Image (spheres, rainbow, N blue to C red):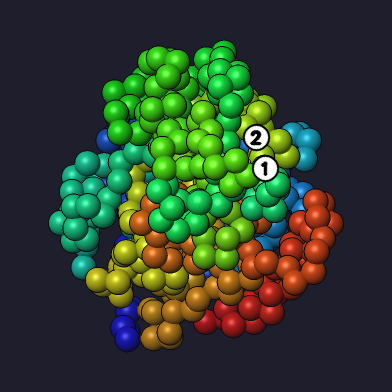
Amino acid sequence: MFNQMEPVKIIGAGLAGCEAALQLAKNGIPVRLFEMRPETKTAAHRTGDVAELVCSNSLKSDQGENAHGLLKAELRCYGSALLGCARQARIPGGKALVVDRQRFSAEVQFTLDDAGIEVVREEIREIPDKLVIVASGPLTSPELAESLTGLLGAKRLSFYDAIAPIIAADSIDMNVVFAASRYGVGRDYLNCPLTRKQYDRLVNELLEAELHPMKDFEKSSLFEPCLPVEEMARRGRETLAFGPMKPVGLTLPETGKRPFAVVQLRRENTEGTMFNLVGFQTRLKHGEQKRVFRMIPGLEHAEFLRYGSMHRNTYLDGPELLLPTLQTKVRSDLFIAGQLAGVEGYVESIAAGLVAGINAARIAKTQKPIEFPEPTMIGGLLKYITTPNQNFQPMNANFGLLPLLNKRVRGRAKRNLMAEMALDAARKFRRNLAV
Ligand SMILES: Cc1cc2nc3c(=O)[nH]c(=O)nc-3n(C[C@H](O)[C@H](O)[C@H](O)COP(=O)(O)OP(=O)(O)OC[C@H]3O[C@@H](n4cnc5c(N)ncnc54)[C@H](O)[C@@H]3O)c2cc1C
């Protein structure tokens, strides 16, 4: 245990770093918050502002029965400062929490000033000693990334996301897919079988579908082992059939014959509530992913828990390196927060900042760090990013992270019930948070 009177150092005044700083300040712990911008730039930020939203100005849904709505409700319950700033900067945006980005940054700056937190404009190149939170984000500066690599191991830091979509297990048509691993070695995968005609149609649609535009700095980082599925289709009509969709070692249970092609679905979590479309990393727009991938036999009603994406992203191998408290395993006074910890998205990054801030405050006050309860969205996310997983990739908030219900309910009623139970658990847990 530590008896920390000197300031906790936080690297990065982005979403996670500012939330962590304000949680520490709320607990009376002094903070030094370091930010390298505007002097040292990143490839995506445009200003020197704190908590800059680098792309969209939407913090996604604010509806209770939506996974992002639930995440916000939990953050509100735990007293998230940045969510308060977002409400102050809100502009009309339907069911989503949409903000005026300049006003949002100004609100965060004002709240930091009010809490007596100075933003020190300096690039940190080495991980400091003593209590520190690294919240340097997906565009962590190269020298700091190197220092992290030295401390945590070279293979433990990734610089690129090639994410395949994840769908809800109970939205897969089990009458169509069959469970089998290639060459009869186990039944670990679900296989969606395609005829030649269905395959051709899928390839046509992949070639025609609308894509997310690539930022200049992302073009150079597209690398061969993780090509997007539509790019593979573009290289030749049969490429997919000889690549991720090859049917070798697989036969249809009814006929014993080999299908023309298969889409394999791999279990994403221990509970088996989420499945990943193997090799289907993609830059298709979200609506297009829904439209095109629902043409795959067995996925006609697929519920997308996470859409595929491809972009620059620095993140740690959380399952190997992190505890659910967001401390690193190698140094209990070193916390990782935000997107670097392996969560994906603005609000998820704020949540990881809140957890790291609360736990760093507990350590500073010689209290034990606390694990957030699993049946909540934040607890589920932390469990996911710290549970052994050979194929670990960053994760966003979704209902597949919550425990299974013990009764059969579907659709909106299911999500409402899950959200209610999660929020109930969060409210009970809040009592333990008083440090
Ligand atoms: C191009 C891009 C677009 C994205 N668009 C979206 C989107 O539209 N919606 C969404 O939900 N998510 C999006 N994300 C994902 C993610 O939610 C955001 O990147 C989010 O800002 C992450 O929060 P963070 O606090 O972890 O990092 P950031 O908000 O990036 O904050 C990290 C801060 O650390 C600073 N820093 C880095 N290295 C150092 C150093 N060595 N010393 C001092 N300071 C340092 C940076 O300048 C930055 O201010 C996007 C990510 C990228 C890369």
User: Looking at the picture, which amino acid does disc 1 mark?
Assistant: Val
Density class for disc 1 (Cα within 10 Å; few <14, some 14-19, many ≥20) is: few
Q: Residue at x 50, y 51 (%)?
A: 180
Question: Measured along the vertical axis of the image, is residue 340 above or below residue 328?
Answer: above
Q: Residue at x 81, y 55 (%)?
A: 410
Q: Residue furthest left?
A: 150
Q: Is residue 408 visible?
A: yes
Mark 2 and mark 1: span between their CA atoms? 7 Å
User: Looking at the picture, which amino acid does disc 2 mark?
Assistant: Pro
Can you tell me whether the CB of the residue at mark 1 lies under 8 Å from the nearest atom of ligand 1?
Answer: no
Residue 297 tag number: 2
Question: Measured along the vertical axis of the image, is residue 117 above or below residue 254?
Answer: below
Disc 1 designates what residue? Answer: 176
Judged left or right of residue 366, residue 68 is: right
Density class for disc 2 (Cα within 10 Å; few <14, some 14-19, many ≥20) is: many
Judged left or right of residue 290, residue 114 is: left
Is the N terminus in the top left, top right, bottom left or bottom right quadrant?
bottom left
Q: Quadrant of residue 123?
A: top left
Q: Nearest the camera: 178 or 359?
A: 178
Of labels 2 and 1, earlier in sequence is 1
Q: How many marks?
A: 2
> Where is residue 303 shown, x and y percent of the image?
68, 43
Q: Nearest the camera: 266 or 18?
A: 266
Judged left or right of residue 262, residue 168 is: right
